[in-house]
Amino acid sequence: MAVLTVRNLSDEVLRALRVRAAQHGQSMEDEVREILESAISPKKRMKLGSLLADMGRQAKLSDEEFAVFEQARGNTPARPVSFE
């Protein structure tokens, strides 16, 4: 695994990091690792279908109106895009 050195942290940041690590019951190193991992990990992606369904619920569509979309939707799987 790689090693990372962070220089020139202010006393305030270092103190806050110590407090945060203690609150979580872990070392400062573990706390920093957790902070970095959460900062760069992808956020939970919402799928397009879920997003559209949420929009429909917000618009208060009836079950009959949802059924129209289900009937109009094609059942054949989409083909991958070809750039050739």
Image (cartoon, rainbow, N blue to C red):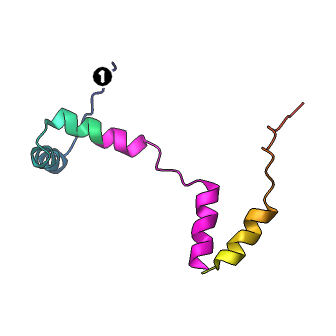
User: Which element type, helix, strand or loop, lies under badge 1?
Assistant: loop
The residue depicted at 60 percent of the width and 81 percent of the height is 60
Image quarter hosting the N terminus: top left
Determine the image quadrant of residue 52. Answer: bottom right
Q: Which of these two is toward me, 14 or 42?
A: 42
Magenta span has 48? yes
| Residue furthest out toward the right | 84
* Main SS of residues in magenta: helix
Q: Where does residue 68 sit, x and y in percent of width and height?
A: 76, 71
Q: Which of these two is toward me, 22 or 46?
A: 46
Q: Where is 42 relative to 48, above or below?
A: above
Q: Where does residue 39 sit, x and y in percent of width and height?
A: 38, 45
Count numbered badges in the picture.
Answer: 1
Q: Where does residue 53 sit, x and y in percent of width and height?
A: 61, 66
Q: Evaluate whether residue 8 shows in this view.
A: no
Q: Where does residue 54 sit, x and y in percent of width and height?
A: 57, 68
Image quarter hosting the C terminus: top right
Q: Is residue 55 left or right of residue 21?
A: right
Q: Where is 76 relative to 72, above or below?
A: above
Q: Evaluate whether residue 57 shows in this view.
A: yes
Instruction: Give the extent of the magenta segment.
Output: 35-59
Q: Mark 1, residues whose alpha carbon is within 10 Å: few (<14), some, or many (≥20)? A: few
Badge 1 is on which residue? 3
Q: Amino acid at mark 1?
A: Val
| Residue furthest out toward the top | 1
The residue depicted at 71 percent of the width and 76 percent of the height is 65
Magenta span has 49? yes
